[in-house]
Image: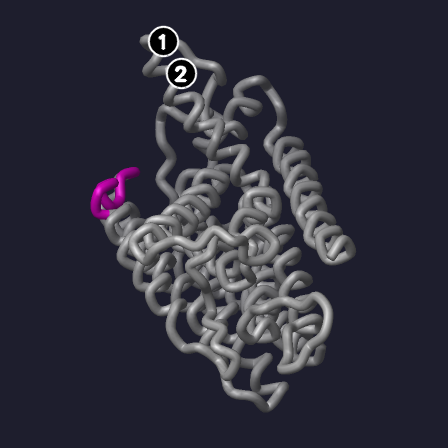
């Protein structure tokens, strides 16, 4: 438990004070957010707000994870390092995208093909590495089996597993990216999901399969290591939310949203809860589906729309809801989804 406390406290302090320094630096360099003219007009006042704040979150999670291990006097394990690799890799893709936007003063960063291919390289590299490094029991950080609350009997061949991992990583990362449209919305939703994964990984650590174990247990590799990453991620987002809440003093940018999504996808894969992520991160799924449905309906009907604007949060903005009202209500949805996922996870254990 001391490792979790140190990990979370370190990450929280780094974002709480580091974000303030980042705001000053970004303002000095003129790295402000560009606002699309076709979006809600209420967003125009946000033009010039510092962006790329997700960089501080990524640094805080890494430092928090290392501090947690220092407190436990244990070396970092491969499971946590792989999740950090995925988070940092996706964050770098977002950083390049953000940097192009602010340096060239345009709303378009990386081209869609370049952005997706970069994400794919990081996701596939993570998936391949996660199938290596077995422990003494032969358990690797990830497995080729599709998982829900634990691995299911459905085992994929390597090629299909890489496609599956690609869908999980890019889907989650871009889901968080779509959610990051209102002050504090994606940050608060990530706190709920990452907090749930902290509890899941800690529970798996206490109920892990040991040599000669009797009764139900979890076959996952170094779950305590995973919980350190999840705790650092949760606390880092809490510290960042101090500055990102409405009215936001800084935005996380694609640097942050892609990194957070990558981290959540990594946590799902190493805890063997890939399909459960759909419920734990239910708000991200709802918002992503609103965009998919809007685009599909628009093309199928020759220009008609279901929502006034997608993603879903902007639909409610155009209906006249105050931004803070939308954010708080969506946070409630995110909390309900995370709580529902935890309940389902625990119910499976009780039934077993």
Judged left or right of residue 93, residue 341 is: right
- Residue nearest the observer in this picture, 295 or 180: 295
Q: Which residues are magenta?
A: 107-114
Work out whether 30 lies above or below 221: above
Instruction: Look at 78% across and 56% down and name the residue there.
Output: 350
Q: Quadrant of residue 329?
A: top right
Disc 1 and disc 2 in contact, CB within 8 angstroms: yes
The residue singled out by tag 1 in the image is 301
Residue lying farthest to the right in this orientation: 350
State the image coordinates of residue 140 (x, y, percent, origin top left).
46, 72
Give the spatial CA distance, label 1 vs label 2: 6 Å
Work out whether 70 lies above or below 12: below
Q: Which mark is residue 297?
A: 2
State the image coordinates of residue 5 (x, y, percent, origin top left).
68, 74
Q: Secondary structure at mark 1?
A: loop
Q: Main secondary structure of the magenta part?
A: loop
Instruction: State the quadrant of the N terminus.
Output: bottom right
Judged left or right of residue 335, residue 166 is: left
């Amino acid at each position: 438990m001391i490792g979790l406390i140190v990990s979370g406290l370190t990450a929280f302090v780094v974002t709480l004070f580091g974000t303030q320094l980042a705001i000053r630096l970004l303002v000095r360099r003129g790295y402000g957010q560009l606002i699309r003219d076709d979006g809600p007009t209420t967003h125009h006042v946000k033009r010039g707000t510092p962006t790329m704040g997700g960089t501080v979150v990524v640094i805080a999670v890494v430092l928090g994870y290392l501090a947690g291990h220092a407190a436990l006097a244990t070396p970092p394990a491969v499971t946590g390092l792989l999740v950090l690799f995925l988070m940092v890799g996706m964050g770098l893709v977002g950083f390049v995208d953000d940097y192009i936007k602010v340096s060239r003063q345009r709303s378009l960063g990386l081209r869609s093909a370049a952005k997706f291919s970069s994400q794919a390289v990081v996701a596939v590299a993570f998936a391949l590495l996660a199938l290596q490094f077995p422990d003494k029991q032969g358990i690797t950080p990830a497995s080729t089996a599709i998982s829900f609350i634990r691995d299911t009997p459905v085992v994929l061949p390597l090629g299909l597993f890489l496609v599956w991992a690609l869908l999980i990583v890019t889907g989650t990362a871009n889901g968080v990216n779509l959610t990051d449209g209102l002050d504090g919305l994606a940050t608060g939703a990530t706190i709920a999901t990452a907090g749930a994964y902290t509890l899941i990984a800690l529970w798996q650590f206490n109920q892990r399969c040991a040599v000669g174990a009797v009764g139900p247990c979890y076959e996952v590799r170094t779950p305590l290591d995973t919980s350190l990453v999840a705790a650092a991620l949760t606390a880092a987002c809490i510290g960042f939310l101090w500055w990102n809440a409405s009215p936001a003093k800084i935005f996380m940018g694609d640097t942050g949203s892609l990194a957070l999504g990558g981290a959540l996808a990594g946590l799902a894969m190493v805890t063997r809860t890939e399909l459960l992520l759909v419920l734990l991160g239910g708000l991200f799924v709802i918002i992503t589906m609103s965009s998919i449905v809007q685009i599909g309906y628009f093309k199928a009907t020759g220009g008609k729309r279901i929502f006034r604007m997608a993603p879903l949060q902007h639909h409610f903005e155009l209906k006249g809801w105050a931004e803070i009202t939308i954010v708080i209500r969506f946070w409630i949805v995110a909390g309900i989804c995370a709580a529902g996922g935890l309940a389902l996870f625990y119910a499976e254990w009780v039934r077993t």
